Image (spheres, rainbow, N blue to C red):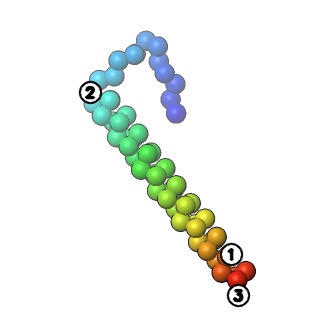
Amino acid sequence: MSEIDPKNTAMSPEEQKAYQAKQKQRAAIMAGLLFFLVVLFYLITFVKINSSIS
């Protein structure tokens, strides 16, 4: 992450679009990771419950 430069407070439209694109990409990666973890925990729980029943 870069530090905020107090001299350069306003972003140009191109910089703002690039920043928003990076934010969108990070959000998509985090959503995918969260979904993967939910599925993984569900599968682990399912396997543990089924193994204890048998």
Q: Which of 40 and 48 is in front in this view?
A: 48
Residue named by callout 1 = 48
Secondary structure beneath dot 2 equals: helix
Under mark 3, the amino acid is Ser
Instruction: Name the one closer to the observer, 52 or 20.
Output: 52
Instruction: Answer left or right for 54 relative to 34.
Output: right
Location of residue 52 with respect to 38 vertically, above or below: below
- The amino acid type of the residue labelled 1 equals Lys
What residue occupies the far right of the structure in this picture? 52
Nearer the N terminus, badge 1 or badge 3?
Answer: 1
Which residue position holds label 2?
13
- Neighbor class of circle 2 (other Cα within 10 Å; few <14, some 14-19, many 20+) is few
Residue 54's disc number: 3
Q: Is mark 1 on a helix, strand or loop?
A: helix
Quarter location, residue 47: bottom right
Front of the two marks 2 and 1: 1
Distance, label 2 to label 1, CA atoms, is 52 Å
Q: Where is residue 10 in the image (x, y as percent from the top left)?
A: 35, 18
| Image quadrant containing the C terminus | bottom right
Q: Which amino acid does label 2 sit on?
A: Pro
